[in-house]
Amino acid sequence: MARMHSGAIGKAGSKKPAKRIPSWAPYKEKEVEKLVVKYAKGGKSKSEIGMMLRDSYGIHNVKALTGKSVGAIVAENNAGKKLPDDIIALIKKLITIQTHLGKNKHDETAHRGLILTNSKIMRLVYYYKRSKILPADWELDKDRLKMYVE
């Protein structure tokens, strides 16, 4: 698949682990769900939870173990954030670019980055409104961006 804002093409990414549960798996289904909910209530994103379970607990695949993804477990227990993780990450990037442009007003490359990041956010918002993850009347308040990140 081609990259969004460059001429580069390529197929990058890691491969998913095997779907079977190994015999040495130290945790059972309920324990894993409790860990996911604990970290979600602690403010961790779904990807951070997956990495912590993999690195600290040796849980290689939550879906193979529980039958549900990390996102489904978080949604069941109403422990997640109001905004999806990818929009939050792009808003953080937008804040960083805006602070940079405040100090370096003539940086045209950063200005282009601001336009592209803004475009990505609007595209995601449109997608999430269509798929009813965000309410239809949700708007990004550009004057108070930092409130979304906290």
Image (cartoon, rainbow, N blue to C red):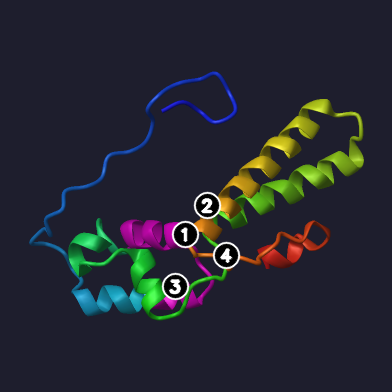
Side (left or right) of 150 relative to 17: right
Q: Earlier in the sequence, mark 2 or mark 3?
A: 3
The residue carrying mark 1 is: 131
Mark 4 residue type = Leu
The residue carrying mark 3 is: 39
Q: Earlier in the sequence, mark 1 or mark 3?
A: 3
- Give percent across and percent down for residue 95: 75, 51
Report the Cα–Cα distance between label 3 and label 4. 17 Å
Mark 1 residue type = Ser
Of residues 24 and 73, the one nearer the viewer is: 73
At x 51%, y 57%, the residue is 130
Q: Vertical placement of 143 versus 95: above or below? A: below
The residue carrying mark 2 is: 127
Report the Cα–Cα distance between label 4 and label 2. 13 Å
Q: Vertical placement of 45 versus 98: above or below? A: below
Image quarter of the C terminus: bottom right
Secondary structure beneath dot 4 equals loop
